Amino acid sequence: MPCADQCKSFASAVGADYGKLRQCLLAKEPQLRKTMACVEASHGNACAKGNPLMVEKRYPETLKIAALSEINAMLVKNGIAGQVKGLMSTGKKLFGCMRKCVDAKAGDCAKKLGCGLQLPPDNALVQNAKQCAIQSGFNTAGIRELCNCAAGAGVKGLAGVCNKINVV
């Protein structure tokens, strides 16, 4: 939540009342925590044990592209990509803001120390995170609930879209 609070200007950019939108996120915090724990557990061997390993350099931008490509593909399958096009551009900026905040709160390890994790390719990471999210309650019903809450908080462009979402 501290990073969401730090990036709240993006909520205003899409017409949301951040206080109401924040309540939507807080209501889903248990599912968010469960998703993060699942992703972390899925990559339990990502940290070097013993002598450090040399791992391939990762680029945050390519992970962002992989994640947004997956989201866009789902929106296209649901027939709503055109309706939420404006939200996607703000979503990209929000993703960047959140990533920078999380990196900073984690000590900017990659920048300061040149370290990283031994992780699978970006597309595999995204698919793993998606499966963890679904298992944690971000299935069709959970995402529709969050979407309707966000629409109620004033996010423009969600009217008539939320109940068309199917998580697959």
Image: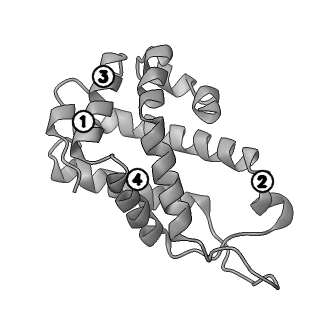
Residue 85: x, y in percent? Answer: 31, 38
Alpha carbon distance from label 2 to label 1: 34 Å
Q: Which amino acid, by three-letter code, is at mark 4?
A: Leu
Q: Give the secondary structure at mark 4.
A: helix
Q: Is residue 111 visible?
A: yes
The residue to which callout 1 is attached is 144
Query: Which comes sooner in the sequence, label 3 or label 2?
Result: 2
Alpha carbon distance from label 3 to label 2: 34 Å
Q: Is label 2 or label 1 in front?
A: 1
Query: Which comes sooner in the sequence, label 2 or label 4?
Result: 4
Q: Give the secondary structure at mark 3.
A: helix
Alpha carbon distance from label 3 to label 1: 10 Å
Q: Is residue 39 above or below residue 91?
A: below
Q: Which residue: 27% across, 48% down? A: 139
Q: Which amino acid, by three-letter code, is at mark 2?
A: Asp
Indicate left or right for 27 with 1 as reference: left
The residue to which callout 4 is attached is 68
Q: Is label 2 or label 4 in front?
A: 2
Q: Is residue 14 above or below residue 127?
A: above
Front residue (pair 154, 32): 32
Q: Are marks 2 and 1 in contact (CB under 8 Å)?
A: no
Alpha carbon distance from label 4 to label 3: 20 Å
